[in-house]
Amino acid sequence: MLIEFEGEVWRWDARTDSWFFTSLPPELSAEIREIPRPRRGFGSVRVRARIGASTWTTSIFPGRDAYVLPLKRAVRDAESLALGDIAVVSLEVLDA
């Protein structure tokens, strides 16, 4: 499954270091939840993500209304993404 979406970059401050994410749209999250796949820790789903010229393998995690995609610093720096920016994301779901 290959999906594309736009999402705002937001920060989760629950830890001493800041983690940055973008949220998948709820309707795409619902489609991903329906894909039969092996159970993984925290309900995570393995994906290959692309923003601009940056591609990496990671996991998305279930949130309240939608899955969230962690945005590591190397990607944010390479793509000049800051808090509140809109990221254009391509995701390939690998756990299918």
Image: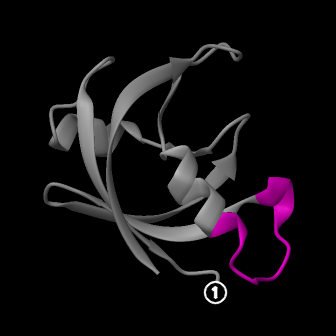
Q: Is residue 47 left or right of residue 33?
A: left
- Residue 59, compared with residue 86, is above or below; it is below
Q: Is residue 25 left or right of residue 88?
A: right
Locate the C terminus by quadrant. Answer: bottom right
Colour basis: one colour
- Relative depth, front residue between 85 and 72: 85
- Relative depth, front residue between 16 and 14: 14
Q: Is residue 53 magenta?
A: no
Could you say where residue 27 lies in the image, as x and y percent from the top left? 54, 53
- Relative depth, front residue between 90 and 58: 90
Q: Is residue 37 magenta?
A: yes
Instruction: Residue 10: name its quadrant.
Output: top left
**Span shown in magenta:** 32-43
- Residue 91, compared with residue 7, is above or below; it is below
Q: How many marks?
A: 1
- Relative depth, front residue between 92 and 3: 3
Q: Secondary structure at mark 1?
A: loop
Could you say where residue 45 lies in the image, as x and y percent from the top left? 66, 66
Q: Which residue is mark 1?
A: 96
Q: Residue at x 28, y 36 (%)?
A: 76
Could you say where residue 31 lies in the image, as x and y percent from the top left? 60, 67
Q: Amino acid at mark 1?
A: Ala
Instruction: Residue 41: name its quadrant.
Output: bottom right
Q: Is residue 46 left or right of residue 3?
A: right
Instruction: Residue 65: name its quadrant.
Output: top right
Which residue sits furthest front?
27
Q: Within 10 Å of the Cα at label 1, are there few (<14), some (14-19), or many (20+) other Cα atoms?
A: few
Q: Residue at x 15, y 32 (%)?
A: 80
Q: Residue at x 26, y 40 (%)?
A: 87
Could you say where residue 14 lies in the image, as x and y percent from the top left? 71, 15
- Residue 20, compared with residue 51, is above or below; it is above
Q: Residue at x 83, y 53 (%)?
A: 42
